Amino acid sequence: MPAATTHDERIAEGQRLTFANRWPDARAVYLTLLSSSRQDSEALYGLARIDAWEGCWRLSEREYRSALGAHPEDDDVRAGFADLLVWQGRSDEAEALLREGLARRPKSPPLLARKAQILYRQGDATQAARLADEAAAYAPDDPDLRDMRNAMTLGEGRITVRYDRYPGGYQDIEWWTAQAMQRIGRFEISAGAQILHRPGLPDVAAQTDGRYPVSVAYHPSTATLIGLEVTPGGPATTIPDIAVRAFGVAPITPFLGSFLSAAFWHYDSGQTVETLAPSIGFQVLPRLRLDARGWLSLVHLPSTATSDASTTPAAAVGGLVAWNARPDLELDVTYTYGAELDANPALTALDTYRSHVASAYADWTFHARPVFGLRPVVTFEDRFGGSATIQIVSFELGGYLRW
């Protein structure tokens, strides 16, 4: 390829190197241009973008401010600066920056798109989708804007089939789950059904039970969620006849998030379970997330003719590694040790078993309109407790549609 000579050719060369992940070479191109003109807004923008991606946020901010000061009408620079502010958790400043730009150019696709993304993070999915539609309509040939709009879903329907394969002498379990969620403003309303079927054994009858969760959640602020879920179930005595769960999600820093749920289960037998489940998530890299998880439960057994009432603690710890291999593919690996009662509501001896559980997930999303995807899961469990140790293998396939 012949060497770039004109300013526009050098800028194009810097962009090509940037998107080829040859950032040192791209940086050299931009620095050469800035040595000739320190107010070259295109070179400053290219350099600011690289510095932002490399985590040099203070340096990137200075470069963005210089570029925007020289050319305040440049929507791409303003949009990139807004991205940088959002990554730092400074959404209010990003909104002010976008308002200033939209006052000049109310139909600017990149500025409308960034405003939509901020609203979506704040939980106002309805308004975010409207602005994203506007941005995509003003730039119908921009694939990035189409992808962004497709990712801003207002609802989701999900169907999952899971088969738990137990060793001989134990009943296998089939799980059939259907769930739908709809966003309205800052609210998320969800309802579903989960059917548990035990095919039976020569001396044990087949059995089918159901759980029917209904939940309402609210986004009070950016990346924050609080909600309540109520799940009736039956007819088996080995699943809760009523379960209530309160949950919340809140950011700690731009890279650190938290989750907490508190649940209460009641069984026909009079047995009750209280569970507290905290989790911390750390975004190590743009495509890599690590989670640390814990579960602490109290199992209350009622008095019977042969035993007094008792309370027994049960606990579990675990972790998750999530890697976005591609924009449409996420690969997850999880491990848990202990008694993760949230995942096993159908156990008869909730307080007496422990498990090593390892799972591998894939989440493959097809960014069509509407968005749909597949989620296959394989889980291996080594469960021990009492006088028995058993190995359980689970196969799960989920499909979802987002609109």
Image (cartoon, helix red, strand yellow):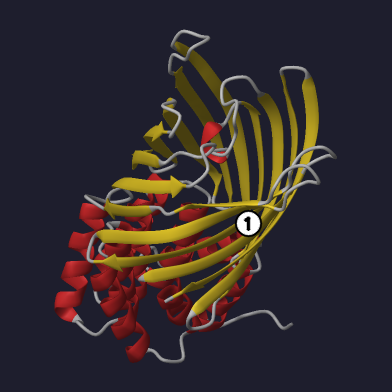
Q: Which residue is mark 1?
A: 24
Viewer-proximal residue among 220 and 163: 163
Question: Can you give x and y, in whole percent of width and height, for residue 153 in the image?
Answer: 40, 71
Where the C terminus falls, by quadrant?
Answer: bottom left
Question: Can you give x and y, in whole percent of width and height, for residue 158 in the image?
Answer: 51, 66
Give neighbour class at mark 1: few <14, some 14-19, many 20+ (Cα, 10 Å). Answer: few
Left/right placement of residue 307 relative to residue 115 reads right
Q: Residue furthest right?
A: 168
Determine if residue 218 is in view. Answer: yes
Question: Can you give x and y, in whole percent of width and height, for residue 7 in the image?
Answer: 50, 80
- The residue depicted at 16 percent of the width and 69 percent of the height is 100
Secondary structure at badge 1 equals: helix
Left/right placement of residue 80 relative to residue 330 reads left
Determine if residue 74 is in view. Answer: no
**In the rendered view, would you say 92 is above or below 37?**
above
Question: Can you give x and y, in whole percent of width and height, for residue 8 in the image?
Answer: 50, 82
Left/right placement of residue 262 relative to residue 356 reads left
Where the N terminus falls, by quadrant?
Answer: bottom right
Q: What amino acid is labelled 1 in the image?
A: Pro
Splitting the image into 4 quarters, where does residue 177 fall?
bottom right
- The residue depicted at 30 percent of the width and 62 percent of the height is 118
Q: Residue furthest left?
A: 103
- The residue depicted at 51 percent of the width and 37 percent of the height is 237
